[in-house]
Amino acid sequence: MSASLVAAGTALVTETVSAQESRAPLWNRRRSVPQRLHIAANQYTCNSIYARENIDFWTRLDEIKNADIDGLEVMFNSASEVADVGKRIADHGLEMRSIYVGGEADMHNENTADKDIARILAIGEKVKAFGTIVLVFNPAVKQGKSDAELIRQSKNMDTLGAGLRKIGISLAFHYHTSELEFGAREFHHVLCGTDPKNVSICFEQHWSYRASGNSQVAVFDHLKLYGNRSAEVHLRQSIDNVWSETFGDGDIDNIRLAAGFKKLHKMPHVVLEQAAENGTPKTISPAEIFRRSADYVRRVFG
């Protein structure tokens, strides 16, 4: 009889945990701990680094893979682009766990939002076949969106996120400077005005820093407020407020950042977004930039 009770209790606990898991956001469900941290590179990063050598990075996918990069986060505007690009990436041994959509979607516009939601959902349907689990989204930029526009934008993003969640993809809010202006009202309302199950955050470590007046205080306040909602983190470093050639030590304390994430639900999907701007040193090859950056990320965030 005691054995039967124990077995029943175990089954109940297992069922309860499974039910809780099914209700959790996709990015917050338990997975086995990988032996090696998966690191993807953003398309913007690849363009920026290889453009300095006048090289089309699409011709160097093998080189990127051999530099210890595991995946590529591609920018998509339409579903028709997905099949060819996804196959090309897969053929070179790279994964596409996340994609980026942004800039053109006016979620604050009552006349165009429904069309944009349908377009992005169509992209989601296509990319899920390539193993995509996070769709990083930056709503169209408009300086000083009104309260009505902010409320409408959050409502539409919640609708989009709910639709993506049904097909197994998490919507992650991406931001730049605009969203952190005017007391960061847009940044906060997207996250306060949406359901965490539908809208997570792509933690923009360096935009949190730069768009807040080069402030580490802002970075770690954002981490405290929204770190446990992070489906993904974009990693970039600067030295004396100029983007560094590789991701490593610099203006932002990444050891502290990694420790903060490790205290939360799990490490978000890690995407390297190191890039070059005016003043960035140019001393090593693109492949070496990726290799050194990936090594640092694995040592600190792995």
Image (spheres, helix red, strand yellow):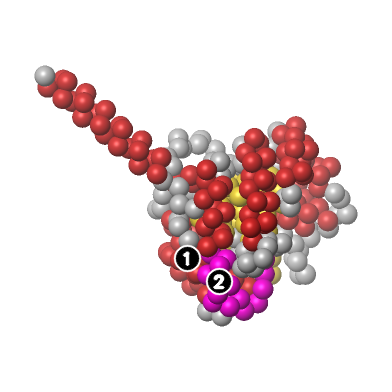
The quadrant in which the N terminus is found is top left
Residue 241 in the figure: left or right of residue 157: right
Q: Which segment did they paint magenta?
A: 140-154
Residue 148 sits inside the magenta stretch? yes
Marker disc for residue 254:
none
Q: Out of 280 and 145, give the one closest to the viewer.
A: 145
Specify whether residue 53 is painted magenta. Answer: no
> What residue occupies the far left of the structure in this picture?
1
| Mark toward the start of the polypeptide (1 vs 2) | 2
Give left or right: position of 1 versus 28.
left
Crowd rating for badge 2 (residues with CA inside 10 Å; few <14, some 14–19, many 20+): many
Q: Nearer the viewer, residue 1 or 269?
A: 1
Q: What residue lies at 77% left-to-right and 69% top-to-bottom?
A: 278
Residue found at the very far front of the displayed protein: 111
The reply to whether the C-beta atoms of the residues labelled 1 and 2 are less than 8 Å apart is: yes
Residue at 83%, 56% (x, y): give it: 51
- Name the kind of residue labelled 1 in the image: Gly
**Residue, disc 2:** 150
Instruction: Locate residue 55, reporting x and y percent.
Output: 86, 50
Q: Tell me the element at label 1.
A: loop
